[in-house]
Amino acid sequence: MAGEDSRAIRVGGKWHWSMAVALTACLSSTAEAQTALSFDAAQMRLDRTSRALSAADHGVDAAKAGADAMRTLHRPIVTASAQYLVYEKTLSVDLAGAKGNALGHTQDFLAAFPGSVPPAFRQIAGEITGRLSQALPGLFDAIPDQLSYRFRDEVFRPTVQAAMPLYTGGAIPAIQRAAQGGVAMAEGRRAQVIDLARINLIRAYFGQQAAAGLLEAARRSRDALDKILSDSRKLEAAGVISRARTLEVQVARDTAERTYQRADLSNATARDELARLLEVEGNVVPTTALFVQTRPLAPVETYLGSEGTAPEARTADAGRQIADAGVALARSRRLPQAYAFGEYNFNRSNALPIEPDWIAGVGVRYTILSNIDRRRTEDAARSQAAAAADTAAEARRIATSATIRAYNLVEGARRSFVLLDSSMVAARENVRVQAVAFREGEGTATPVIAAQAALDTAEAQRIAVAYEYDLALAGLLASASRLDAFGAHLAQADQRLTYGTDR
């Protein structure tokens, strides 16, 4: 091979160093494209790179921040404002009545005045008062019946206002409980996302191992039939078997080639899926084998009883908490509300005439008539709470059923794997015996082909059952809220199926 590379690079007796460098770079990049990862390393990488997990974390952070924001609803709200006002005020005073009264009182006074002076001066006083009485109507006519005054001014009005709830009918505690329920729901959804991501990793990681195992089994089957076909052609040339027997082996070998090609494509697809899941450039080479623990698991009752901690149940419980808070909030709309308030003006010297320097007080507000039927709103909230409670109970029932079903799948896969071990031994021995008989001319190709097909089927089933065991175990642990224990089960496994992943 080295000589062939040298001839490819050497042209006309001269070395082309650029081509040599290109070949070296190509080989280097091929080597770098292979990333070997154990399952634990793959899981840690998934935790770092998964967008779904990151989104779930952000959702929890947002819910917690929102709940923290609701903790201070009992505190007062203080606002500062500044206003620049230009205003105009018109005042009107009706003087007609006052003017008539004043004229009448004045004339009465003048008429009585002469009698209050000494007799010697009464004639003079009478003449004077008479003249004044005649002049008074003219004097009062000069006074308008209505006096109007228009005032324009500019005011800068900086103020501070404060308002604090004293009693809300239970609205504030309900909102706070709903916010805490939102946190619990976000955490439950994050747990669901984590379990789903890990199960998806188990499916893809061990799925690639299974695809590699099926590819290797298909390669061995094809190579074995190549050997049988070669023997058939030799026996045909020696006149031991007919041409029809050779063609029969040729058909079986071509079928094995097609199976190998399909397995190769499936393996490539599995490689690509795992690499994309882990966001790895090139191919991921799994170093953790498919595994089976041939000893039975602990009884199914061991995995029951933790349904309330399952992510689906936690999410449903959070929904029920939010719905119960909704009932309290709907009830609060039918109750009165009490509050305290206050305001202070920092520019009292330039305030409006009717504006106080400061004001403080308490108030009560009650909605007598609303455009929404508050009773029906509360009934709707109660129905939602009942639905949430039923959903939570159903989530627990489903978790129990899923645990039992997954347990049975694990046990079924374990039993099948144990039975296939003995079948593999018998199938290999049958292939050896039939091949020997065929090469010695004591048998036909048909038993050899059938024996090889039986071995291929048993080996493919063994790989599939091991993969089924791993997936079922992950489902069992997830439904029992114990998916973190998957690594411990992997470490305790006594059967491991290792296959090369390189072509």
Image (tube, grey):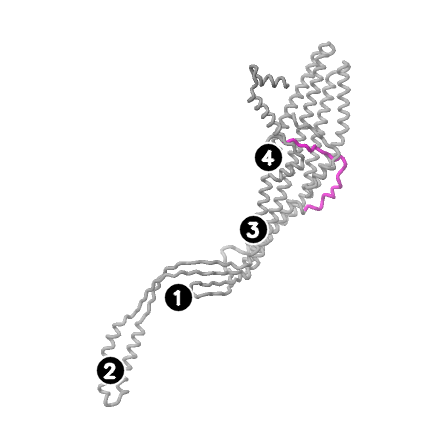
Quadrant in the picture for residue 462: top right
Q: For mark 3, what is the residue?
A: 66
Q: Secondary structure at mark 3?
A: helix
Label pair 2/3, CB-CB below 8 angstroms: no
- Marks 2,4: beta carbons within 8 A: no
Question: Which is more foreground, mark 2 or mark 1?
Answer: 1
Q: CA distance from mark 3 to mark 4?
A: 33 Å
Q: Amino acid at mark 2?
A: Thr
The residue to which callout 4 is attached is 279
Mark earlier in primary sequence (2, 3): 3
Is residue 226 one of those drawn in magenta?
no
Image coordinates of residue 337 in percent, x first then y, are 53, 61
Distance between the Cα atoms at labels 3 and 1?
44 Å
Extreme-front residue of the structure: 14
Q: Earlier in the sequence, mark 1 or mark 4?
A: 4
Q: CA distance from mark 2 to mark 4?
A: 116 Å
Disc 4 residue type (three-letter): Glu
Q: Which residue is mark 2?
A: 129
Q: Residue at x 77, y 14 (%)?
A: 440
Residue 110 or 85: which is nearer the viewer? 85
Coordinates of residue 12 in the picture (x, y in percent): 56, 14
Q: Nearer the viewer, residue 83 or 217?
A: 83
Upstream in the sequence, badge 3 or badge 1? 3
Q: Which of the two marks, 2 or 4, is nearer to us in this view? A: 4
